[in-house]
Amino acid sequence: MRRAETLSQHWIMLLALTVAAALAATVVPPPWLTPAVATLTLIKGRTVIDSFMGLRDASPLLRHTVDAWLAGVVALGLVVRLA
């Protein structure tokens, strides 16, 4: 698959996840919604990191550092939301 097609598919997926998150924010959240949104955030973050920031082929140290940052941000969001 060509790179442009892959980026377009990732972009469409990101838009769909954003719309799903926005729709989920309009209802009274059931208990499972917060972990589901956190999971969607991780998926979106990994997609942006790999496809749009170009870190798929970066050094392992850089990739692990950015992965740790993403996990930390999502974990902090979960702690704040569930506290």
Image (spheres, rainbow, N blue to C red):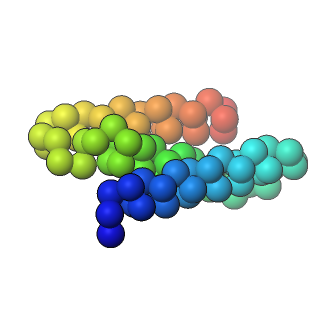
Q: Nearer the viewer, residue 81 or 24?
A: 24
Question: Residue 55's quadrant in the figure?
Answer: top left
How many numbered marks are there?
A: 0
- The answer to whether residue 68 is visible is no
75 lies left or right of 6: right
Residue beneath the point at 75% across and 45% down: 22
Q: Quadrant of residue 36?
A: bottom right
x and y percent of residue 56 in the render? 24, 49
In this picture, residue 50 sits left or right of residue 80? left
Q: Is residue 52 left or right of residue 39?
A: left
Quick one: quadrant of the N terminus? bottom left
In percent of the image, x 38 and y 42: which residue is there?
Answer: 52
Residue 9 image point, x, y percent: 49, 60
Name the spot of residue 14 as percent of width and height, x first.
56, 51
Which quadrant would the C terminus be assigned to in this image?
top right
Q: Nearer the viewer, residue 55 or 78?
A: 55
Q: Left or right: 34 with respect to 4? A: right
Whether residue 9 is visible to the viewer of this picture, yes or no, is yes
Q: Residue at x 33, y 57 (%)?
A: 3
Q: Residue at x 17, y 48 (%)?
A: 57
- Residue at the right extreme of this rendering: 27
**Quarter of the figure with residue 6:** bottom left
Q: Nearer the viewer, residue 19 or 71?
A: 19
Of residues 62 and 82, which is closer to you in this image?
Answer: 62
Q: In the rendering, at what x and y percent does residue 28 appear?
A: 87, 48
| Residue 5 position (above or below residue 53) | below
63 relative to 16, above or below: above
Q: Please, is residue 81 above or below residue 27 in the view?
A: above
Q: Is residue 65 above or below residue 31?
A: above
